[in-house]
Image: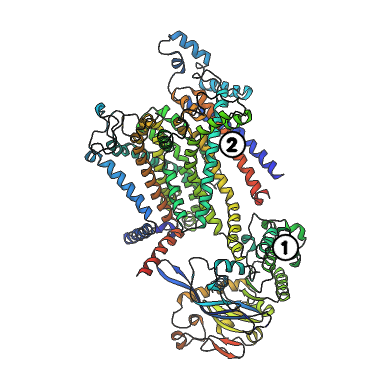
Amino acid sequence: MSNISAGHHPRTTSERVQAFLRALRYLLDVLRARPLFAVGYGIVVGVVVLAIFAPLIAPYPPETANPVDFLQPPSWRHLLGTDATGMDIFTRIIYAPRIDLTIAIAGTAISAIVGSLIGATVGYYQEVGGVPSFFSGFVMRSADVLQAFPVFVFAIALVAIFGQSLQSIIAAIAFLNIPIYLRLMRSQVMSIRRMRFVEASYVAGTPDRYIILRHVIPNSMAPVLAQLSVNIGWSVLLTAGLSFVGAGVVAPTPEWGSMIAMGFQNIITGQWWPSVFPGIALAVTVFGFALVGASIEVLADPARRRAMAGTMRQRRTKEA
Amino acid sequence: MRVVRYIGKRMLFIGPQLFGIILVSFFLVKLIPGDPAVMMLGPLATEATLTELRNEMGLNLSLVEQFYIYIKNLVLHGDLGRSWQTTRPVTEDLFLRMPATLELITLGLILGLLIGVPLGVGAAYLKRGILAKFSDYYGLLAGALPDFWLALVLIFFFYTILGWVPPPLGRLDFFTIAPPTVTGALLIDSLLDGNWAALGSAAGHLILPVVTLGLISGGPILKMTQSTMDRMLESDYSRYEEMCGLPKSIIIRHALRNSLPSVVTIVSVLYGFLIGGAVLVEIVFSWGGAGQYAVQGVLNADINPVLGFVFFAAVLSLIIYLIVDLIYFAIDPRVRG
Amino acid sequence: MAENSAAGTILNIEGLNVSYPVYETDPVRALRGIDLKVREGEIIGLVGESGSGKTTLARSIMQLISRPGRVDSGRIEYDGRDLATLGEEELRALRGNDIAMVIPNPRTELNPLVTVGMQIANVARYHLSLPRKEAKKMAMAMLEAVQIPDPTRRFKAYPHELSGGMAQRVVMAIALICSPRFIISDDATSGLDVTVQTQVLELLQDLVQQQGASMLFITRDIGITAHYCHQVAIIYAGEIVELASTQNFFDNPQHPYSVMLLSAFSHNPKLRGLWTKVVDAALEGAAESGCYFAARCVRASDKCRAEHPDMREMTDAHSVRCHHPVER
């Protein structure tokens, strides 16, 4: 983290280790000042662990209907009850992040990489003039048009075009998020481009490609990372929404959105558990990612992280 | 005057912007697989009748020709084609459904403002209090809750258990006679008609979806209000007002006024988003709004409703951004120049 | 109430220490043991470089130290009342009403969305509980008093529509409208042209004396104090190092720092900028135990590096904090 504010890279291994340790200490101070952030990290790690070890933990198979046991309320036998086809809700909830998180993380990662690269290039050449600046104008106007579409309808249309599969949902999410990173990276790069050390290596004749990859992108990563985490949460919501209208993951594959949709009819007749529990799991997960994003935002802002870590230090010295 | 010149300049860009949006969405939506002719006539239709229908709909032409015809009809006759599902012109369908959506999201955003602004101001002012804590949690939670799920939970409590609200099936009770359509917004139309039964029924049906959207959109409004107010209360002029010994209430009122542009911006962004984004809530409440119409179109390879919806949404967003600019003009003397 | 028993002292600062905590190092001590008395009707000049603690002192008097700064010890008495014991409402009634501040950079500190007339009127309205109309009338009169050209039009102007000099006059109008007894002018004219600066300062001096108020006149420009102040205080590294009547001070400056200021400051902004850097460097090297100025002082001895000097009264109305004061 420290190299972001200082604007240079630690060269030797020991410098790197020190920078890492300093960043870690900041993180711990900030987590102590805002315990809620720690909860966020806990949720994210917890959900990932549950997803990985789902087959070991889950008491029932996730996709096998059991018509005898349909719509059972929560009990010791079925912790969170069963749905209309008799599938165990607890089992399906802990299997679901395998799909939801895969889609969200893959989609967001692709858009972050593609969007950042385009954004960095566009921002770097913004003020040069000639072909590059014409190109960047074109890219930005395209992003405008892309963002002018109603997001949800656009997502459904993309899934409809690519066919209803995991890959096409990932593609749709990636496509939708590209403009966000494009803009973010572009504005970052434009301000970093003007900084003295970048100017210096430019004057020294370092190739553009090298400057972008070595100086500009590493120094503008912090807001992208903060956005990434928030975006993963948001993509989980979008995936669930797509499945809810039937344009996303198809039943009986365990996925929170489609589980909520399956329980939709039951809730009106009073069987709340098939919908409510997956929704809580979904909300908690998104909440966790949002918190992690917020913590990164604080860590990336020298003033805020100092203020926060500083109050922590004061409190500690007072106690001592 | 500057306002007029500014708006004129804005208007110049609207045409090309709309054209770009239609261009992209046309070729995109055309990529959706599925043959409308087959869907319309069913699996038992003969190849001959299918071909005839395709010719009639212009599907045998090249994409560029189809696009040309589409644009020509739009510009010359304001015609957005027909939906094969409703067999009616898309413009008519949308004029019927768009007001339903707009009524819903306008009321939802008003509720969001009523929740978000006071909480945001309070949290910015009382930094260490319970209110600030609550606002923090609320902001994060509102961003994490799926709106369609929140809608279901509300239905469960207030309809299934308590029975305080009508069933989530449309905008009016079955036996209520709808008022004649003037604006399309049922609250206004029934008021104009003096139809109190319809007014009550419409209001009852609006409660849950509006509360859903209000609770969710209150989150971003709160965050924006809080962070801007924070900045404004720390700003040089707020400190100066404090130095001059002005009462807290005045300092807060001035800071709020200076924060208004940000709040207006976030509301406009939310409005633009919700025109299509409220579709999940619309589906839960069988609202029959514009978003739902478009989604049905996508799922059934009925492309005219989709294109029409995108067009309407784009026009509405542009109008909203224009209004926002006018509000900026009214608030900030520096922009007026 | 003119000449009361406390020899007409309106502001009395005793042993004021203020510091700003810093993450992972020792707090920065912005003010160290400030003692200062201001008598009624007196204008006292406070001269020091940026970072010497001038603004912190001004904000301390207003009881508005910017976060995370805090008062470690000492007291500030205004009109016999310890300001630290007053509640938020009592303080609010004092600020802008009894103690007013004339600020630098008024164009960023005036509210951009409120007309200047209303900003002046607001202060009168809430302190003097006047109806809106009366307050506006008073603000109008005040705009005339600060000699703004075309006051009727300026009344409805927004801050961004004013020139620097006009904005400065507006801020003076805000400060003076409630006829305060004590005025702090914080580097108020630093952003103006020299000619405008003179006009504004003379106006300020006139108005202050008309109202019989006292003023703490904070500046970086030592030359100005000779014309407008009764007393001069030199502040260095958060500490007052010399305090004398203007006459005595300019006749016989005794602290080596004062002498350097006088020689280096001959209205040359470049020299001033250079000086700031030198001071910063000196501050970094300063030992906590000795004289803070020792590292930069030509007269420094081993004693200076080992022992912190106390304030000594050399002659009548002339004190200096130095082991080896300069003699004529």
Residue A244 spot, x, y in % from top left: 39, 32
Q: Name the residue under label 1.
A: C139
Identify the element where label 1 is drawn: helix
Say above or below: A211 vs B66: below
Work out whether residue A100 or residue C141 is closer to the camera in this orientation and state it.
C141
Dot label at residue B318: 2
Which residue shows up at 54% across the image and 54% down it?
A: B229
Work out whether residue B179 or residue A87 is closer to the camera in this orientation and state it.
B179
Crowdedness near tag 2: few (<14), some (14–19) or many (≥20) residues, C-alpha within 10 Å: some
The three-letter code of the residue at mark 2 reads Leu
Mark 1 near mark 2, Cβ–Cβ under 8 Å? no
Q: In which quarter of the image is residue B156?
A: top left
Q: Can residue B311 be seen in this view?
A: no
Circle 1 or circle 2, nearest the eye = 1
Q: In which quarter of the image is residue B191?
A: top right
Q: Can residue B239 be seen in this view?
A: yes
User: Is residue B71 shown left or right of residue A112?
Assistant: right
Identify the element where label 2 is drawn: helix
